[in-house]
Image (tube, rainbow, N blue to C red):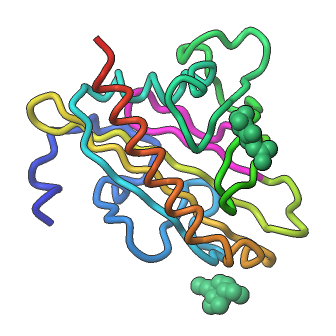
């Protein structure tokens, strides 16, 4: 792909699969914790942001600030003592409040941090209500591009025997993931 030839060189020792660097947001997309086992659907959005990767990654890990920029996940509450992106650790519970799935409806979910590989990759999983909606993992990838740009890509795959329960709201999920990517770009590019 044209895109991959334009990547700057990445560190050799990354814990997430190197194939993620070529994700094109189509079809079912694997996640680091679950792979593709019993995957029902993926949603994915990607955007180029005029800022270096560490800056974009820090905004995604700065949960207290979601209310300042994110129209999809309008609030995010990390554990006590987590004041900024540098405090985020594996295994932490983050409470996310989101809107739009389906339109006009708000919901709250608690995800568990599964990967933090600053400034290139992060992920969190949701295993609440497994018997009703299966499980999922939300992956966030920050790829350095020439001229100080970042290619931000985030995806979520719904898996498990009951992962298909949420299939009817797949299009809503997809739309909100695109909004979130656009909101992130607008916010990061407006920071001084
Ligand atoms: C996901 O679930 C929907 C609804 O049950 C079904 O139509 C679709 O074939 C499933 N997709 C996969 C990949 O299992
Ligand atoms: C959803 O949350 C937003 C932000 O807190 C709030 O303004 C809105 O009234 C809520 N909508 C519903 C249907 O609860």
Image quadrant of residue 77?
top right
Residue 101 seen = yes
Residue visible at 59% across and 65% down? Answer: 172
Image quadrant of residue 181?
top left
Image quadrant of residue 90?
top right
Residue visible at 61% across and 24% down? Answer: 63
The quarter of the rendering in which ligand 2 is drawn is: top right
Q: Nearer the viewer, residue 104 or 81?
A: 104
Name the dominant secondary structure of the magenta segment.
Answer: strand
Q: Quadrant of the N terminus?
A: bottom left
Residue 64: in magenta span: no
Q: How many marks?
A: 0
Residue 109 seen = no
Residue visible at 38% across and 44% down? Answer: 182
Residue 113: in magenta span: yes
Q: Quadrant of the C terminus?
A: top left
Horizontal and vertical percent for residue 165? Answer: 77, 76
Image height check: is 171 above or below 150?
Answer: below
**In this picture, residue 120 sits left or right of residue 74:** left
**In this picture, residue 39 sits left or right of residue 77:** left
Horizontal and vertical percent for residue 138? Answer: 58, 51
Magenta segment boundaries in residue numbering: 112-126
Horizontal and vertical percent for residue 49? Answer: 26, 36
Horizontal and vertical percent for residue 76? Answer: 68, 30
Residue visible at 10% across and 54% down? Answer: 5
Q: Nearer the viewer, residue 1 or 73?
A: 73
């Amino acid at each position: 792909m044209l895109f991959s030839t334009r990547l700057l060189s990445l560190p050799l020792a990354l814990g997430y699969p190197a194939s993620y660097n070529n994700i094109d947001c189509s079809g079912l997309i694997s996640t680091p914790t679950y792979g593709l086992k019993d995957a029902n659907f993926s949603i994915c959005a990607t955007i180029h942001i005029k800022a270096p990767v560490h800056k974009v990654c820090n905004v995604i890990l700065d949960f207290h600030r979601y209310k300042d920029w994110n129209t999809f996940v309008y609030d995010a509450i990390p554990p006590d003592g987590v004041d900024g992106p540098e405090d985020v650790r594996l295994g932490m519970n983050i409470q996310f409040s989101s809107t739009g799935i389906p339109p006009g409806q708000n919901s709250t979910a608690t995800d568990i941090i599964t990967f933090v590989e600053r400034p290139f990759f992060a992920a969190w999983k949701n295993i609440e209500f497994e018997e009703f909606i299966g499980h999922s993992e939300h992956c966030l990838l920050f790829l350095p591009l020439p001229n100080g740009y970042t290619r931000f890509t985030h995806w979520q795959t719904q898996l498990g025997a009951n992962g298909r329960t949420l299939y009817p709201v797949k299009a809503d999920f997809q739309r909100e993931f695109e909004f979130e990517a656009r909101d992130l770009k607008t916010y990061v590019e407006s920071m001084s």
